[in-house]
Amino acid sequence: MTATITSRDRSVAWIDGVNPVTRILIALALSVPLFVTLDAVSAATAVVLELLCVPLTGLTYATVLRRMIPVAVFAPVAALSMLLYAQPGGTVYGTFLFATVSDDSIALSGAVLVRVLALGLPTILLFGRTDPTELADALAQVAKLPARFVLGVLAGARTVGLFVDDWRTMTLARRARGLGDRGALRRFLSMAFVLLVFAVRRGTTLATAMEARGFGAPAERTWARPSRLHPRDGAALFGAVALMAAALTAAVTTGAFRFVGG
């Protein structure tokens, strides 16, 4: 699905001045600490502080909430598995086969639910407006990744939007033939298979075309648009570290901090 970003929207987004490589480092700074702790306080604090930073990203709160829907759908699934199969502790409220619901499993379930939201939100805020070409320039010039890999990533990112268009076209075509009103599961599986075939064929054609145009040549490649780091990148990274430090401090202060496996 392609998104159109006007110049006016670009001018008011503070995050647009941050290099994409720095955004990747920020995403790691906001995510990695959450993998070593399993408590609701640190994750909830991180979510609240990240939501306060939404105006810096150029996205509206409505857009962020809409893009968080897949994460919000997955979070209860992860929380349910923790609720049923976590190590029991405290009062046990019920058991069934290998599943046990207890005070500890309920607490861990809530922590996992919030943590999944805290892990998904930074990606949406940091990369919701990132241009694939700008990302490729940064990966090649700042991160010094191989040009062949970078161009492959760019080509793949550019074709993602085509999958949505293909799915929409197939849906309209099936409805035109009277095949789109019944059997939702069967229709989904058949369309997913057709989409997979389209993806393989398109990827093969694109790879051949790129090789024919010399994109895989071993020579050193030049880039039309320079990508550099600026003081804003340091400020953004420092802010991310401070945000996560505040979240962990809140967990330690309230006594909720808990190492994974502890």
Image (cartoon, rainbow, N blue to C red):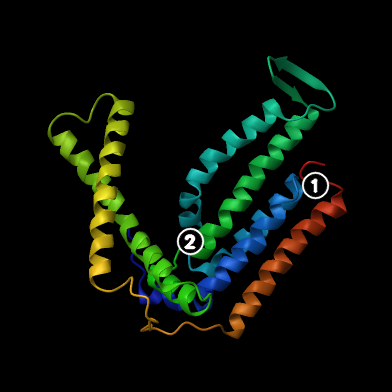
Mark found first going from the N terminus, 1 or 2? 2
In this rendering, position of residue 115 left or right of residue 138:
right
Residue holding disc 1: 259
* Picture quadrant of residue 27: bottom right
In percent of the image, x 69 and y 50: which residue is there?
35
Residue kind at label 1, given as amino acid type: Phe
Does 67 appear above or below 10? above
Residue shown at the point (32%, 32%) measured from the top left: 189
Tell me if residue 131 can be seen.
Answer: no
Give residue 164's position: percent from left, percent from top: 30, 49
Label 2 sits on residue = 60
Residue at the extreme front: 218
Asked if marks 1 and 2 touch (Cβ < 8 Å), the reply is no
The residues tagged by marks 1 and 2 sit, at their Cα atoms, a distance apart of 34 Å
Q: Position of residue 23 (x, y in %)?
A: 56, 69
Inspect the image, locate mark 2, and give the three-letter code of the amino acid beneath it. Answer: Thr
Give the quarter of the image for residue 108: top right
Q: Residues within 10 Å of mark 2 (few under 14, many from 20)?
A: few
Is residue 217 visible to us here?
A: yes
Number of numbered callouts drawn: 2
Residue 47: image location, x then y, percent = 65, 54
**Which image quadrant: the N terminus?**
bottom left
In the rendered structure, the answer to whether residue 192 lies left or right of residue 260 reads left
Q: Residue at x 59, y 35 (%)?
A: 76
Q: Looking at the image, which is closer to me, 262 or 119? A: 262
Q: Is residue 178 above or below residue 66?
A: above
